[in-house]
Amino acid sequence: QVQLVESGGGLVQAGGSLRLSCAASGIILSINTMGWYRQAPGKQRELVASITSAGNTKFGNSLEGRFSISRDAAKRTVYLQMNSLKSDDTAVYYCNAVVVTTLTTIVTSWGQGTRVTVSS
């Protein structure tokens, strides 16, 4: 069993910044990709950013200039730094991790979500 616990969401004014954190715990041999997705009301869940164990990153939809992602392997934690926030960034943000739990098992886990609200 793998648990992902997110923190750092909240209310921020447009133009402001937030930093989200997600810590993994449980039965973990190693973690491959960690990332963040978001889902706005009435919209599909979409990729925000992901980072592999090698440090390769991927961003969704023109977010790279404002958002950055990093991870601390020792802490099993991934961070999402969000700058110059816009009202369109309002959504529930979900942490995601691809975790090797045994020599033959890889699972994809999701956090419970943390709400980010950007006021204009």
Image (cartoon, helix red, strand yellow):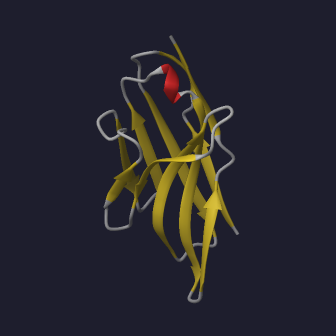
Query: Farthest top residue?
Result: 120
Across and down, in percent, residue 42 comes to: 68, 34
x 32%, y 67%: residue: 54
Across and down, in percent, residue 26 comes to: 64, 66
Q: Nearer the viewer, residue 63 or 50?
A: 63
Across and down, in percent, residue 88 comes to: 51, 25
Q: Is residue 37 left or right of residue 44?
A: left
User: Total marks drawn?
Assistant: 0
x 38%, y 67%: residue: 53
Query: Farthest bottom residue?
Result: 104
x 36%, y 54%: residue: 58
Q: Quadrant of the N terminus?
A: bottom right
Residue 38 sits in quarter: top right
x 64%, y 56%: residue: 110
Across and down, in percent, residue 60 comes to: 42, 46
Q: Is residue 110 left or right of residue 75?
A: right
Q: Is residue 31 above or below residue 120?
A: below
